């Protein structure tokens, strides 16, 4: 998996220009000392009907399902490739070389915190994490969650959940790249 640093900076530059205000100061009072649920878009997501937590953080496409069942996440962590509905949440939007053409989606979001995977500048932050899900976990830890619960997380599964991408009609077999990303996410969770 090779990524272009030039493309990463290009996307980061555009995101920094799009964001009017940095809303990072909203995260500590929402997360600190709370029981936080992080909702992923794995195959088990469709079994989730309620979430017992003080704060709900959704990872990208999981947001679509949560809205379907009447749950508005407090925070959405997204690189924009899975989300197709925009509840009134706080958004942590990640810029990388592969999502330049998706950054238009930010116009649907009121409160945005920008992240990148290059040296941060302007209104952008670098929290860590590789996938939307493990990035959500790193953010919850960074801002002092008391405990973290996981819903729709299937890091060992051979399937990509249908809510992972808007064009998926059912759970599908993981691509090689998806399997690698899930292994990296698992490693990040074990380190933090």
Image (spheres, rainbow, N blue to C red):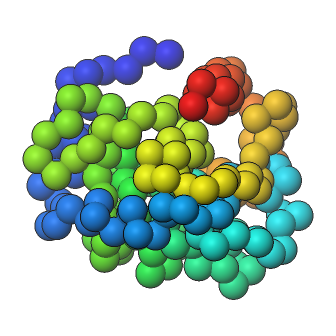
Residue 99 screen position, x and y as percent: 37, 43
Q: Which residue is drawn at 64% across and 23% down?
A: 187
Q: Which residue lies furthest to the top in this view?
A: 2
Q: Judge by depth and name the residue closer to the eye, 78 or 126.
A: 126
Q: Is residue 17 left or right of residue 128?
A: left
Q: Is residue 137 above or below residue 173?
A: below
Q: In this view, does 171 lie to the left or right of 21?
A: right
Figure quadrant of the C terminus: top right
Q: In this view, does 141 lie to the left or right of 65?
A: left
Q: Judge by depth and name the residue closer to the eye, 128 or 98.
A: 128
Q: Is residue 180 above or below residue 79?
A: above
Residue 95 shows in the view: no
Residue 80 screen position, x and y as percent: 44, 54
Residue 166 screen position, x and y as percent: 61, 58
Q: Residue at x 31, y 45 (%)?
A: 115
Residue 64 screen position, x and y as percent: 62, 68
Q: Residue at x 20, y 24 (%)?
A: 6
Residue 93 figure quarter? bottom left
């Amino acid at each position: 998996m090779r990524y272009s640093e030039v493309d990463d900076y290009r996307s980061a530059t555009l995101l920094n220009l799009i964001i009017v205000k940095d809303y990072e100061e909203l995260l500590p009072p929402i997360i600190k000392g709370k029981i936080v649920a992080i909702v992923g878009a794995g195959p088990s997501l469709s079994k989730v009907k309620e979430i017992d937590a003080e704060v709900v953080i959704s990872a990208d496409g999981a947001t679509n399902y949560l809205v379907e069942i009447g749950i508005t996440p407090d925070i959405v962590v997204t690189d924009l490739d899975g989300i197709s509905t925009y509840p009134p949440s706080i958004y942590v939007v990640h810029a990388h070389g592969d999502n330049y053409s998706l950054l238009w989606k930010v116009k649907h979001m009121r409160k945005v915190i920008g992240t990148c995977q290059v040296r941060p500048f302007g209104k952008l932050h670098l929290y860590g994490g590789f996938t939307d899900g493990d990035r959500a976990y790193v953010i919850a830890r960074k801002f002092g969650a008391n405990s973290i619960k996981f819903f729709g997380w299937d890091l060992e599964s051979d399937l990509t959940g249908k809510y992972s991408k808007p064009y998926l009609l059912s759970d599908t077999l993981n691509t090689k790249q998806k399997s690698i990303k899930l292994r990296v996410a698992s490693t990040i969770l074990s380190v933090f």
